[in-house]
Structure formats: C-alpha cells, structure tokens
C-alpha cells in the first residue's frame, strides 16, 4: 500500500510539472489575437503591391534597384507633403491605361506613437493626393527595430534582380511574424485592358415552300384525296 501511495505521488508531481510548463509556454488568447491582427492588414496589401512591381536589377548599395521601383532607404514617399515616420519599403510601378502611362506608389512606413508603433501604407497615383491606412496593430517602438525587410533575389547572366521582399515583424510578446511576397509583373509597364473585339455573325435564312393541292383529281397532286 505504501508503495502505491508513493508511486501515485510521483505521478501527480510529474503531471503538475508538465501542466505548469504548458501554461507558462503557451501565450494567452489575447496575445495570439494581437499577433494575428498585427499581420492582418499587411498580409492583404503587401502581396498585392509587390506583385504589381516589376523585377529589376539591384543597385550596388543593395538599398533598392537601379530604376527606383524598390527602395528601403529612408526617403520620401513621393506622394506630396505630409510624410510621417520612417520608410520601411517604397514600391513603384506603371500601368498603361487608355494609351497613357499611370504611375502608382505604395510606401510602408513605421510611425511611433506614445507607447507603441504602427506600420502605415501610403499610396498615390502620379504623385497626387495620398491615401494612408494602418496595416498593423501596435508594435514595439521603432528604436527597437521591430521590423526588418530583406530582398528576395534571383541571379540571371551575372545580374542580381530584386524579385520580392520578406517582411519580418516582432510583436510585443517577442514572436516573429513573416510575410513573403513576390513580383508577378514580367514587364516594366503593366498593359491595359485589351480593346473589345467585334464579331459579326451573318445569319442565313432558309425558305421552305410547301405545295398545296390545287386539284384533288390531278394524278400529280402531291396530296391526292384517298379513294
């Protein structure tokens, strides 16, 4: 009996230790929800913007490309006055719409608040009026570098091309969240919507003539009366 009691005590202690470890290492539901919200906006917009940006040869300093379409330098958005925070990533691409070329800009910037930072997405067309939205929940302040951006690269004929980005975001809980996005634009300028093709269809009318009996007694009548 004594042996059974001792064994049960050891088993109970082991179970309690395992349970305590799980509770301590599992983040609370609220923290997991905050992590999900931290990626919600940027996981929607970043892949779309990167997909539209054409791949381009990388600049020598690796801060962007030689054509100015990809940049991680802390420069202006190009969407007029009113920039806030620091640049994380600036993207630019052009589209051919109705025979004219339109330039689009999408810039991701980290902006500090009193206790937390956020990532803003600023967009404009042809350098006109800006539209700015928040794409993350609260993050650690920028001085702790909670966001890192790395290029996705491909080498062709000895030339390194920027073909996408990898965004890594560190949350208040210490978790690292990552969003990968790749270019899907093979040309320097996206083509517009093709003109509609007009198809002409000619209808053929077939006329069928049915003979009517003129003389019931005529032997050539197609419909003679029965005898």
Image: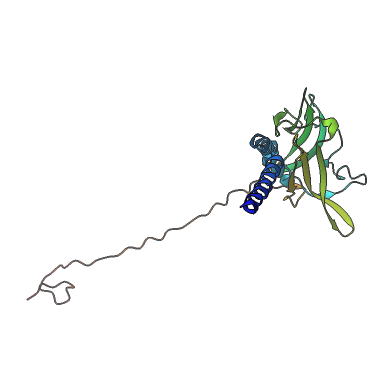
In which quarter of the view is residue 217 placed? Answer: bottom left
Find residue 147 and report its image quarter: top right
Question: As drawn, which residue projects farthest toward the front?
Answer: 1
Q: Is residue 215 left or right of residue 109?
A: left
Q: Nearer the viewer, residue 95 or 40?
A: 40
- Total numbered labels placed on residues in the image: 0
Q: Is residue 51 left or right of residue 74?
A: left
Q: Is residue 29 above or below residue 182?
A: above
Residue 195 appears in the rendering: yes
Depth check, front residue: 35 or 47: 35
The C terminus appears in which quarter of the rendering? bottom left
Q: Residue furthest left?
A: 227
- Residue 22 screen position, x and y as percent: 68, 44
What residue is rendered at 13% in x and 73% in y?
224
- Nearer to me, 211 or 84: 84
Residue 65, compared with residue 142, is above or below; it is below
């Amino acid at each position: 009996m004594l042996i059974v009691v001792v064994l049960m005590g050891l088993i109970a202690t082991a179970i309690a230790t395992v349970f305590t470890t799980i509770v301590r290492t599992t983040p609370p539901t609220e923290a997991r929800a905050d992590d999900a919200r931290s990626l919600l906006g940027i996981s929607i917009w970043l892949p779309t913007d990167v997909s539209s940006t054409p791949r381009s040869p990388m600049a020598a300093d690796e801060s962007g490309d030689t054509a100015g379409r990809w940049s991680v330098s802390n420069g202006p958005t190009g969407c007029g006055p009113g920039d806030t925070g620091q640049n994380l990533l600036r993207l630019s691409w052009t589209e051919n719409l109705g025979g004219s070329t339109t330039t689009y800009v999408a810039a991701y910037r980290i902006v500090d608040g009193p206790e937390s930072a956020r990532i803003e997405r600023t967009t404009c067309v042809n350098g006109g009026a800006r539209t700015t939205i928040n794409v993350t929940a609260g993050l650690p302040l920028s001085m702790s570098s909670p966001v890192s951006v790395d290029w996705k690269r491909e080498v062709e004929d000895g030339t390194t091309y920027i073909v996408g980005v990898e965004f890594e975001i560190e949350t208040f809980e210490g978790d690292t969240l990552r969003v990968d996005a790749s270019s899907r634009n093979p040309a320097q300028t996206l083509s517009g919507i093709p003109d509609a093709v007009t198809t002409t269809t000619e209808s053929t009318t077939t006329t069928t003539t049915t003979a009517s009996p003129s003389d019931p007694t005529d032997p050539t009548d197609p419909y003679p009366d029965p005898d």
